[in-house]
Amino acid sequence: MNYAIAIDPGREKCGLILADLDNHIVIEGKVVISSSVLDLIIKWQNNYEIKLIILGNGTSSNFWYLKLIEVCKLSIKLVEESGTTFRARGRYFEISSPNFFLRFIPKQMRIPPKNLDSFAALLLLEDYLHRKFQWLGDISLKTWPE
């Protein structure tokens, strides 16, 4: 199987997803503090055959690009990330069905959780591959020290 990591980079925290490229499935998604990003990537590399890293070209992307080249030695693709944070809200509501009562509130008026960085990372991957992925596992929006 082929796997990819997508990263929505930031100074204090980053959104990351691990995706199965063959089956178009998100295996895991996390928001982690910046000091733990490389540890999580190395953990994923040890458990999965990572073929590709997708990195958003926004905040602190140059820093992360150099770190990833140094540590991972994988193919890294810088992709346009403008608008992904805003679009992550809509993608979150597509994947995470609201509870019964929230379904009666128009989508534009629903307030999503704050940590949608992993959904921004998902959009980076989907935009790059021109394909939607399914998020089958639990959705954790907590910022992890990992």
Image (tube, helix red, strand yellow):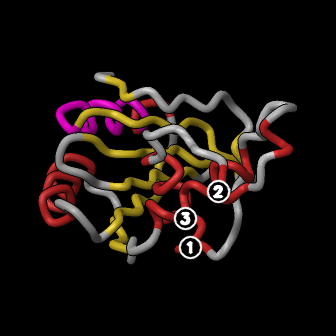
Main SS category, magenta section: helix
Q: Which mark is residue 87?
A: 3
Drawn side of residue 111 relative to residue 38, left or right: right
Q: Is residue 70 magenta?
A: no
Callout 3: SS: helix
Front one among 33 and 102:
102
Drawn side of residue 70 relative to residue 83, left or right: left
How many neighbours does mark 2 have within 10 angstroms: few (below 14), some (14-19), or many (20 or more)?
some
Q: Is residue 135 above or below residue 88?
A: above
Q: Looking at the image, is mark 3 or mark 1 earlier in the sequence?
A: 3
Task: Identify the image quadrant of residue 136.
Answer: top right
How many neighbours does mark 1 have within 10 angstroms: few (below 14), some (14-19), or many (20 or more)?
some
Q: Residue at x 43, y 48 (%)?
A: 117
Q: Which mark is residue 127?
A: 1
Circle 2/circle 3 CB separation < 8 Å = yes
Q: Is residue 73 above or below residue 131?
A: above
Front one among 96 and 49:
96
Drawn side of residue 54 relative to residue 109, left or right: left
Front one among 137 and 11:
11
* Amino acid type assigned to the residue bearing label 3 in the image: Arg
Which segment did they paint magenta?
A: 34-44
Q: Which mark is residue 94?
A: none
Q: Residue at x 47, y 66 (%)?
A: 84
* Amino acid type assigned to the residue bearing label 1 in the image: Asp
Which residue bears the numbered disc 2?
91
Q: Residue at x 45, y 51 (%)?
A: 5
